[in-house]
Image (cartoon, rainbow, N blue to C red):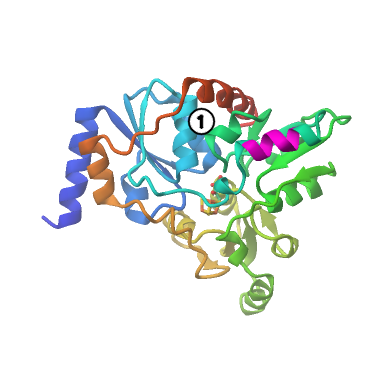
């Protein structure tokens, strides 16, 4: 038996023994997506995590996603197979920064992208993902100021869609800023029938020339339902695996071949097996953080 098949067998055995479920983000490597029980975007994963009945959740994604699973389903053991899988954007704002921002704008409502730490989420009013950020902001009272953290590009996209004057932070995704508008314009000339679909973490220049701006889950749904057969995809390239698997006859061009999130690629089959064998690395959060962060995540879930 080849080594990968042996590992896959062990994972299946350990999952039964430990009563575990494997959740994976759309940017995970193909092998991980293939053995996961559920693959999705941040919103889908949050909802799925909150409904899990198993004792253990092995979360294949980055830390803020595993923390979100723990916050929404605190009785479960949540494991992340590589403890260094972080999100640089989430680390661009601290809870102290949020407290100071709120002091400077005492009447503002604070909306927080889920790409943030649990401590930050515990200090905000409502969370959002890229799939529901526009609806969340649209739902807020018109006479209130809004602080939107930490992604300035998602924030400026939401501002353009809602016409609300958001107070932004200076966070961004180091992977999505690699996507370049000029390169996409050239690709459109080479592939005249291709539709350009980008993630709202891209820069405003990229968003301006896109045909559609969608979360990773939104991209999968849109492409599946579209009559079109060619797409230029402006997001982390891990999603191309899933797009291709679900739509074998359609053609996908990554807007930029090096759009790779190194943190999303840290998890592999061996690490999932070790994670289940040794119960590593467990996500532990204080009761207080869970209580406060949960309130803002539960409000977000109403916009699923
Ligand atoms: P989605 O929620 O659209 O999957 O995005 C998560 C993310 O980290 C994008 O970089
Ligand atoms: Fe964070 Fe960007 Fe990686 Fe998404 S792609 S997890 S925002 S660094």
Task: Look at the picture and state if 92 lies above or below 301.
Answer: below
Q: Is residue 156 left or right of residue 57?
A: right
Q: Which is nearer the eye, 190 or 263?
A: 263
Residue under circle 1? 47
Q: Is residue 118 left or right of residue 210?
A: left
In which quadrant of the rendered view does residue 173 lie? bottom right
- The answer to whether residue 43 of the structure is visible from this angle is yes
Count of marks placed on residues: 1
Task: Look at the picture and state if 227 lies above or below 52.
Answer: below
- The residue at the point 51 percent across, 30 percent down is 47
Q: Quadrant of the N terminus?
A: bottom left
The location of residue 113, given as percent across then percent down, is 63, 40
- The residue at the point 32 percent across, 44 percent down is 81
Rate crowding at label 1 as few (under 14), some (14 to 19) or many (20 or more) other CA atoms within 10 Å. some
The location of residue 204, given as percent across then percent down, is 73, 60
Task: Look at the picture and state if 282 lies above or below 286.
Answer: below
The CB of the residue at mark 1 lies under 8 Å from ligand 1:
no
- The residue at the point 55 percent across, 46 percent down is 217
In which quadrant of the rendered view does residue 10 lie? top left
Q: Is residue 197 left or right of residue 141?
A: left
Question: Residue 17: within the magenta?
Answer: no
Q: Magenta span covers which residues?
A: 96-102
Q: Quadrant of the C terminus?
A: top right
- The extreme right residue here reads 143
Question: Residue 101: within the magenta?
Answer: yes
The location of residue 65, given as percent across then percent down, is 48, 39
The location of residue 27, given as percent across then percent down, is 46, 53
Most frequent secondary structure within the magenta stretch: helix
In which quadrant of the rendered view does residue 285 lie? top left
- The residue at the point 59 percent across, 28 percent down is 122
- The answer to whether residue 138 of the structure is visible from this angle is no
Q: Which is nearer the eye, 95 or 199?
A: 95
């Amino acid at each position: 038996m080849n080594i990968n098949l042996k590992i896959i067998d062990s994972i299946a055995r350990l999952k039964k023994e430990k009563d575990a479920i494997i959740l994976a983000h759309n940017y995970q490597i193909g092998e991980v997506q293939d053995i996961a029980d559920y693959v999705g975007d941040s919103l889908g994963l949050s909802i799925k995590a909150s409904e899990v009945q198993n004792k253990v959740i092995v979360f294949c994604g980055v830390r803020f996603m595993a923390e979100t699973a723990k916050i929404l389903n605190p009785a479960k053991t949540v494991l992340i197979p590589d403890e260094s899988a972080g999100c640089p954007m989430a680390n661009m704002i601290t809870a102290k920064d949020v407290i100071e921002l709120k002091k400077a704008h005492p009447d503002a409502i604070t909306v927080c992208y889920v790409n943030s730490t649990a401590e930050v989420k515990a200090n905000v009013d409502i969370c959002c993902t890229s799939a529901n950020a526009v609806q969340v902001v649209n739902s807020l009272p018109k006479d209130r100021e809004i602080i939107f953290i930490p992604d300035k590009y998602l924030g400026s996209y939401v501002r353009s869609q809602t016409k609300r004057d958001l107070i932004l932070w200076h966070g961004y995704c180091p992977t999505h800023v690699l996507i370049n508008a000029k390169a996409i314009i050239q690709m459109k000339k080479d592939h005249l029938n291709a539709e350009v679909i980008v993630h709202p973490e891209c820069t405003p220049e990229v968003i301006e020339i896109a045909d559609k701006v969608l979360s990773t889950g939104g991209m999968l749904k849109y492409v599946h339902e579209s009559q079109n057969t060619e797409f230029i995809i402006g997001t982390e390239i891990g999603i191309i695996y899933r797009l291709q698997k679900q739509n074998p006859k359609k053609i996908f061009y990554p807007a930029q071949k090096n759009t790779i999130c190194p943190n999303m690629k840290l998890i592999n089959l061996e690490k999932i097996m070790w994670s289940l064998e040794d119960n590593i690395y467990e996500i532990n959060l204080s009761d207080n953080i869970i209580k406060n962060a949960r309130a803002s995540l539960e409000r977000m879930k109403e916009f699923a």
